[in-house]
Amino acid sequence: MCSKSVEPAGAIFGTWIESIMIRRRIRRLYKRFLKPIVKPSVKWSRKRLRSARASLAYTRALLASLLRQPASLYYVPTWIESLRFSGPPLAVHVPNWPYIATRYVEKQLHRLNYQATVRERGARPPWFGTCRRRAVVFEYGGGSSTLWLAERVQSLTTIEHDAGWFTRIEQALAATGRTNCTVLLRQPQDMETAPGTPSDNDIDYHSDKCPGTFAGYVQTIDQFPDSSFDVVFVDGRSRAACLHHAAGKVRPGGLLVLDDSNRESYQAAMQCLRGWVRKDFCGIKPFQSRLGYTTCWTKPESTPELGPSATPTARTLSTQTVMK
């Protein structure tokens, strides 16, 4: 007769403890990895859903801009490299506009430099002559675009409202050895001490990002005669008011550039540029993942007088729109 083997009590207790530990380990792995998938909480799913919708909307807008602007595909590697850049903001001399807008502005600067050379010499320059750095430019809001423009124009006047940023721009210009740029500091003023004229009652000189009034900042361009500048860049504070004051300072055939032109607060001020040839740019921009919007206007040789009841012709309102 075979004798039935009996396990000792210690072995049975050890097996029971081991099974409990295995169950706990399985339960811990389930809570960590499988439960969010099998039984997601309401908070977790809503958070992921909002993130997925935002990513999908951004991807659609990015693909739409790349498809409508095939030239932007050329700048995708440069754009990805700029997103990884962690150095100081003024280390790279690249404007913070869409790449395609920067390319367009550079082409227009070549044209304006040539026209300025013709005005200076009274005749067309020879093929071996140089037409560089002849344009006169005014800029609202300094930054990396200031360093980029200083390398391509004869004279540049930049207005800045922030004292710390003003100092950094001057130091960056001194490091490059550029002497053709004048940076002026015009800080916002209190409403009680700010100068004003009766004709400025309809113009708002405030900014949503800074307290005070920017009347002195905007009106700095008024000390120059009309048609003084080949290009005026508006990329600072109180941009709607800057458009009103800058329109008369651009030479016929010159350029007026507005960054972030998709903002609703600028749409009404754009009506003062009716009759100008307009180009809208939307695409990837350096150092930012969001899309950038920039609009360029070319002043016609003869600006028509457009009153409130005037009906301009189709030619005067011709708009060359790249992307809205």
Image: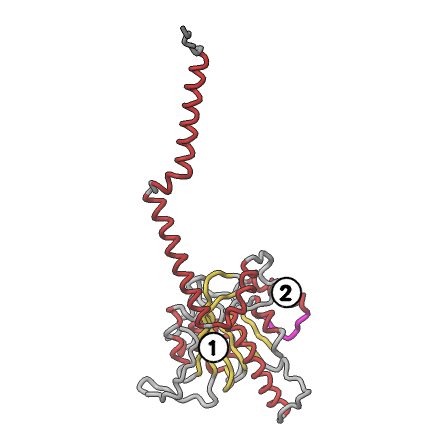
Query: Which of the marked residues, 2 or 1, is nearer the chain's N terminus?
Result: 2
Q: What element carries label 2?
A: helix
Q: What element carries label 1?
A: strand
180 within the magenta span: yes
Q: What number is the disc on residue 172?
A: 2
Percent x, y for residue 240?
Answer: 42, 72
Quadrant in which residue 83 is drawn: bottom right
Other residues around mark 1 within 10 Å, as few (<14) / some (14–19) / many (≥20): many
Residues rendered magenta in the picture: 177-183
Screen quadrant of the C terminus:
bottom left
3D distance between C-alphas at marks 2 and 1: 27 Å
| Near-viewer residue (263 or 186) | 263
Q: Which amino acid does label 2 sit on?
A: Ala
Other residues around mark 2 within 10 Å, as few (<14) / some (14–19) / many (≥20): some
Q: Residue at horizontal 61%, vertical 73%?
A: 150
Quadrant in which residue 303 is drawn: bottom left
200 within the magenta span: no
Picture colour scheme: secondary structure
Percent x, y for residue 138?
Answer: 54, 76
User: Is any part of residue 160 visible from this angle?
Assistant: no
Q: Mark 1 points at which residue?
A: 296
Question: In the rendered image of this protein, does residue 45 appear above or below residue 184?
Answer: above
Q: What residue type is labelled 1?
A: Cys
**Contact, mark 2 vs mark 1 (Cβ under 8 Å):** no
